[in-house]
Amino acid sequence: MRERQRHSLKDVARKADVSVATVSRYLNGTLDLPARTRARIDGAVASLGYRPNPHARRLSLGRSDTIALVVPDIANPFFARLSAAMERAAAARGQMVTLHATRSCHDREVAVLELAAENLVDGVVFLTHHATGPEIAERLNHFPRAVVLDEDVPGVTAPRLMCDNELGGFLAGRHLYGAGHRKVAYIGGGGELFSTAARLNGLRRGMDGLDATRCYVGEHAARSGRSLARRFLDERDGETAIFVGSDELLLGVLEVFRDAGILVPHDVSLVSFDDVRSLHLFDPPITAVAQPVDTLGRRAVELLLDGAWDDPEFRRTTELLPVHLIDRGSVGPPTGSGQKETGPSPLHSQHGDTS
Amino acid sequence: MRERQRHSLKDVARKADVSVATVSRYLNGTLDLPARTRARIDGAVASLGYRPNPHARRLSLGRSDTIALVVPDIANPFFARLSAAMERAAAARGQMVTLHATRSCHDREVAVLELAAENLVDGVVFLTHHATGPEIAERLNHFPRAVVLDEDVPGVTAPRLMCDNELGGFLAGRHLYGAGHRKVAYIGGGGELFSTAARLNGLRRGMDGLDATRCYVGEHAARSGRSLARRFLDERDGETAIFVGSDELLLGVLEVFRDAGILVPHDVSLVSFDDVRSLHLFDPPITAVAQPVDTLGRRAVELLLDGAWDDPEFRRTTELLPVHLIDRGSVGPPTGSGQKETGPSPLHSQHGDTS
């Protein structure tokens, strides 16, 4: 292996004819020196091209100018875009980013948080898609700065940042109700998660208080979407539409529907959540609740670097970013085989519960 | 800010009643001690829960167990999946990953490589999508271990790993030629890049030596795809098909075609390159040359960690991974408006140049 050419503090001290401790304390800004001595040290630093070893600097300062991003899966475009936005915001502030994928696996989350703690990262942005236990909360509470992103982690004393899941559910529900649907299914990730409960609350409100939602929950992955879509088709009992909890699940749902000859929106209407997968070019174009992915990423880094961390109240805040619905071609009137009654299309009628 | 509870080497030394230097050298494995002293130090380490500071360890060992990934854009699903595969392979080997996005911008690439060098990373995986100058090559040559991934970087003494771009061009050309196309356009990223030349060579071979390819080059981004597709429609002179250099460019091409009422494959046939964007669910499903993304990522980490770095020959190797074509619905016979002659479909006819 090639060796790096790097001058040490000792070389600078020798050249400037002062002690190593003097150079070190001068460069750390903890020692005042006569102008002549300063000039000698500055000259030695310049002529040797001396740069402090960052590990030594970290050791003495106890910080690393590094932010750890902990996400379930970077290949998922939602996390990819979120990571990209965080990296961009961090780089603009001179912070480096380490990236850790956990597959939402408990042991891996614990290991990653321990590694980040050992590396004295300045902060952690933590995302998970499963219900975490006290071990995760405890470890997160030990970081000087941690932001919980996208999904709640119970028991953590840290600011939360997520999209307004309840608003997302409400917008989907209102859109489906407005198109005439009275009985819908939810295909989502994580039945015990905060986000699922919030979306289902919103969906019910949007559906004018109707509570006729059958839930199918797995993980946010295409493979899970496939198995949940098959179960939906087997057990379907009058549901004319599905609110799908992520674009990842949507992929699996669309694959199963295509193979089964189910036409969207003719047989089943669909609304997705995320809008990170070029859904406007799909067959048909998919109506979706769009997450503010780039803003979420940028804001997470802002909270980490500029938050009022000395204020205990700040560690109890939850910031919700608004979502919006993009109307494309995947919601139609409820004329599918799931409908028990047929007749004139109830599109945009606001009366009557036909579930 | 909360302070971390961390015992120092000094605490261990005090408790074990030996000097700090003794503890340090014993824990580094550079000092033999009598069994009784060893037991005293081991006991002190255990009872204080002492763990060496990783920055101190890095400082003394001159390495960091960290790999730097330098990519143009993490939000691009090709790089996202590649980064995910590299992170997974690195984590399995106990290596951490730092992630750096450059937007293929020269200044940012230089800054990132300098930062990685300062941080004493054990290796760099470098990807760029522009023709880099000697400053990049020089910096890459200073790393003990660097792998050049996906696109060539001239002047670097480092192993290259990429997909077989010429094979990809050949497969696209043969598929289009087989469907009757005799005049095609290439919409790609970076006219001066190694990958572009390789793909065009392959395309020509696949098209039975025909050289009737008009090239439109920009960057691998949807916005670039839009402007290149508009130029293609303005300047079109008999081209009945397009070989598109990436799924990112494809998004822009499809958007422009949809807005202009151009039907695929009826008016223009398309073959994409990458196959990382759920193209099977697009309207129409898009035929594409699929890159072995996960294998590329895993293999890059293998080369970095297990390569024969002491052998100068190893630093001159180029490893090509095979690609394959997935036939979907975006290539038809050349009956579009770009065709100067009409008549019976020449699909699968192997004779005659109708361009």
Image (tube, coloured by chain):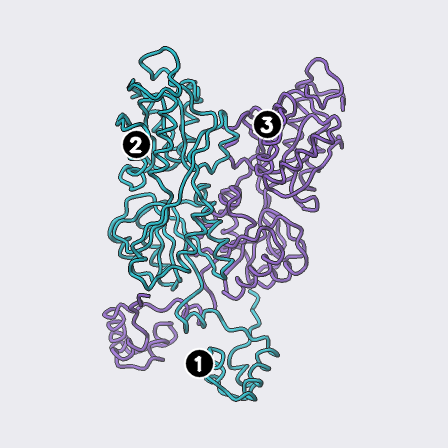
Chain colours: A cyan, B purple
Whole-number angstrom distance, CA of label 3 to CA of label 2: 36 Å
Which amino acid type corresponds to the residue marked 1 in the rendered image? Thr
Residue B292 x, y percent position in the rendering: 53, 39
Chain of the residue under the numbered disc 1 shown in the image: A
Give the chain of mark 2: A
How many angstroms separate mark 1 from mark 2 (CA)? 61 Å
Query: Which residue is identified by label 3?
Result: B258
The crowd level at tag 2 (other Cα within 10 Å; few <14, some 14-19, many 20+) is: some
In the structure shown, which secondary structural element does the residue marked by tag 1 occupy?
A: loop
Q: Are marks 1 and 2 in contact (CB under 8 Å)?
A: no
Crowding near the residue tagged with mark 3, few <14, some 14–19, many ≥20 C-alpha atoms within 10 Å: few
- In this image, A191 relative to A279: left or right? left
Where residue A146 appears, as percent x and y from the top left, is 35, 57
- Of residues B302 and B349, the one nearer the viewer is B349
In this rendering, is residue B158 above or below B26?
A: above
Foreground of the two, A90 or B220: A90
Which residue is painted at 45% across and 43% down in the image? Answer: A75
Kindly identify which residue carries mark 2.
A205
The quadrant in which residue B26 appears is bottom left
Q: Position of residue A234 (x, y in %)?
A: 31, 21
Picture layout, residue B151 above or below residue B61: above
Q: Name the residue carrying label 1.
A: A30
Secondary structure type for disc 3: helix
Residue type marked 2:
Arg
